[in-house]
Amino acid sequence: MSKNISTEKLLSLIIKWAEDKKAINPITLDLSFLDRMTDYMIVVSGDADPHVKAIAREIESQLKKAGIKDFLWEGSTKSGWIIFDLGEVIVHIMLEKERSYYNLEELWGKKAIIYH
C-alpha cells in the first residue's frame, strides 16, 4: 500500500470508486478487534456480471493511479465474486445472490459494521 495514503483515506476512496460505478450497499467492516487476518473489509454488490467487472476495473484503475501497486486480486465475474487484497484492507465485490448467501456482514457481527 502507498505510504502517502492512510488506511482511513483508502477506505473512503475505495467506497467512492465503487459508488462511482453504482455499487450496491457498500459496507465497511472493522475487523481490527481480531488479532489476525486484516483490519478492514469492504463489501459491495453488483447486480450482474458486467456490473461486478466494472466495479473491479474501476477500483483497480484508481488504485494504480494512486500509486498503489502492491495488491492482489482474485476471482472472476463467472464466480460472482472478486476480491482485492491490499493487506490491511480486503475488498469483496459480489453479485447480490452470492452476498446474500455468504452473508459476510453477519459472519463478523454488527459491532464490526461501519455504515457509509
Image (spheres, helix red, strand yellow):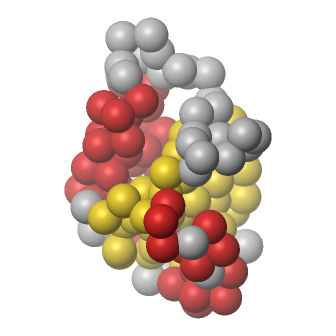
Residue under the point 66% across and 88% down: 101
Which quarter shows the C terminus?
bottom left
The image shows a total of numbered marks equal to: 0
Q: Where is residue 21 drawn, in percent x and y? A: 30, 61
- Asked if residue 112 lies left or right of residue 114, the reply is right
Q: Is residue 60 left or right of residue 100?
A: left
Q: Is residue 87 left or right of residue 30?
A: right
- The quadrant holding residue 6 is top left
Q: Point out residue 26 in the picture as x, y percentages from the top left corner.
A: 37, 66
- Whether residue 89 is visible to the viewer of this picture, yes or no, is yes
Q: Is residue 67 above or below residue 52?
A: above
Q: Quadrant of residue 89?
A: top right
User: Which residue occupies 66% across, 74% down?
Assistant: 107
| Residue 42 horizontal/vertical position (percent) | 48, 55
Q: Residue at x 51, y 84 (%)?
A: 96
- Observer-nearest residue: 101 or 19? 101
Along the horizontal axis of the image, is 18 left or right of 94?
Answer: left
Q: Residue at x 42, y 30 (%)?
A: 7
- Asked if 64 appears above or below 27 in the picture, the reply is above
Camera-nearest residue between 51 and 19: 19
Is residue 56 visible in this depiction of the protein? Answer: no
Q: Nearer the viewer, residue 47 or 24?
A: 24
Find residue 71 and report its horizontal and vertical position in percent.
Answer: 62, 30
The answer to whether 113 is drawn above or below residue 57 in the figure is: below
